[in-house]
Image: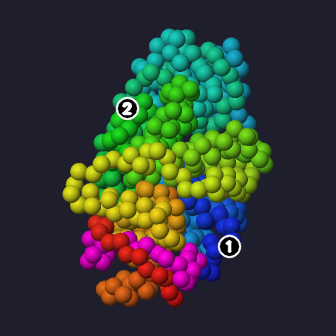
Amino acid sequence: MVYTARDAAASSILAAGSPFRRQVKIVATLGPSVSEVDNLAAIIDTGVDVARVNCAHGTIEGRTRQIAMVREIAESRRRNIPILLDLPGLKIRTGPLEGSEPAMLARGTKVRVYSTPVISTREQLGVTYPDLLSVVQPESRILLADGLIELVVESIENDHVVCGVGRGGPLAGRQGVTLPNVRLQNASLTEQDKIDIRFAARQRVEYLGLSFISSADDIIVAREYARTLGITPGIVAKIERPAAIDDMDAIVRTADAVMVARGDMGVQLPLERVPIVQKEIIAACNRAGTPVITATQMLESMIMQPVPTRAETSDVANAVLDGTDAVMLSAETATGRHPVAAVEMMSRIIHEVERHGPIRSPAVSRTLPATDPEQIITDALGRAAREMTDAAPIDCIVVFTLSGASARLVAKFRPGVPVIAMTTDPYVARKLSLVWGIRALVFSMTDDIDELFATASRQTIEAGYANVGDEALFVGSIPIYRVSGRTNLLHVRTLTD
């Protein structure tokens, strides 16, 4: 279905103080807490911009239902909401639990660890890594549940290892397992990843999250595999391994978006390094113009509590100040008791930070220099658009974009006015919902340039993004809309209906 600006005018995005006036976007993870239509609709109405579906949990049938619900609700709200399908990668996990309650592993006790996903109890557990017995030795550490539980290998038996519990705690089913200082040998895409990408092709999802990558080559492999299936989703590279941090610049240049995946990063690295690495990744993305998502435990206490801690509030605010494009909720919306309150709180924090003016990290002014002559011109126009909105009474920027590249280019320089992307492709419109500051409208193309400007003016006003008499800066290409990624037009025009 194609959404026009008139459709958008009927939706809640026009309300005064609407959460959809934010520049920084909110990604919410789906799960049992929002498995019913009313609950899912509530978090979408409260401010969710991107729906994350985690392939590490649930079933194909469940994920199919989640995606269908998001699209049905988005259609009813005239919203462009993309699906981020998060692939598990080579994530080692424990097996399922014996019962419904977590298994309590007490410090000083012993536990048998098998290299198959056997039922987990206080005395034994299995992991989804067949080579476990060959990569550990006595005194090796095995970390469970994002590092909350620590096991120390005492002996290696025929089909299991015996461990002492060095740091205990409750262990739920299918929890993450980390083997510190062990370099896992694995293919860029696991067989399960390929199954999930084929599912993504059937569902036409907008983004694929690529877990546990080691280099930019992993992104290329995933992108090419998706193309063989006839889809071109944006690849979100999750930086969490030390090897990926070492190849950060190449990953940022190659990916369509990047996720600062602090959960596994905080297990792979010393915890005290995580804040600095987060800032380095965001700065690298800002320089390259690559959208970046800051994720994991942002409002963790709201899984159980109706309000966050002060530290969590500051964490979200500082990610916004650092220059992130989006912030993400994980268990807060997937399994938490207060999913709507978590989205509302995150939106309020972002609003308060943005209320003090455009957020431009120092990295935005130090963007990577282009080398291709045409790209040099395109980058210069993007920077000029930002400078014009600073120096002249420009009320909004309207970008004509075929692939979304021109709109992302403008957003890269963080202008202080709304960025409206006009595209003929609903798929592109949904993908742009992840990017800082962009609101997309779908329109019908015309070869008449005067009619094109008039149509864009009318739709921008009808959508509530501007008013009659406002000054708009139009950005696009000549010939209009014929060459993807080529931007060579700046045009100031007074909006009329």
The location of residue 108, given as percent across then percent down, is 68, 13
Query: Principal SS element in the magenta part?
Result: loop
Q: Which mark is residue 459?
A: none
Disc 2 is placed on an element classified as helix
**Quadrant position of residue 106:** top right
What residue appears at the point 64 percent right and 16 percent down from the top-left corner?
166
The location of residue 412, given as percent across then percent down, is 42, 56
Position of 345 with respect to 50 (left or right) is: right
Nearer-the-camera pick, 438 or 363? 363
| Up/down of 358 relative to 471, above or below | above
Nearer-the-camera pick, 148 or 374? 374
Nearer-the-camera pick, 119 or 381? 381
What residue appears at the point 56 percent right and 26 percent down from the top-left corner?
272
What residue appears at the point 70 percent right and 26 percent down from the top-left corner?
169
Q: Label 2 sits on what residue type?
A: Asp
Residue that badge 2 annotates: 246
Q: CA distance from mark 2 to mark 1?
A: 45 Å
Q: Is residue 232 magenta?
A: no
Q: Label 1 sits on what residue type?
A: Ala
Determine if residue 271 is in view.
yes
Label 1, residues with CA under 10 Å away: few <14, some 14-19, many ≥20:
few
Disc 1 is placed on an element classified as loop
| Up/down of 380 relative to 79, above or below | above
Please report the bounds of the magenta region as a residue range.
Answer: 459-485
Determine if residue 83 is in view.
no
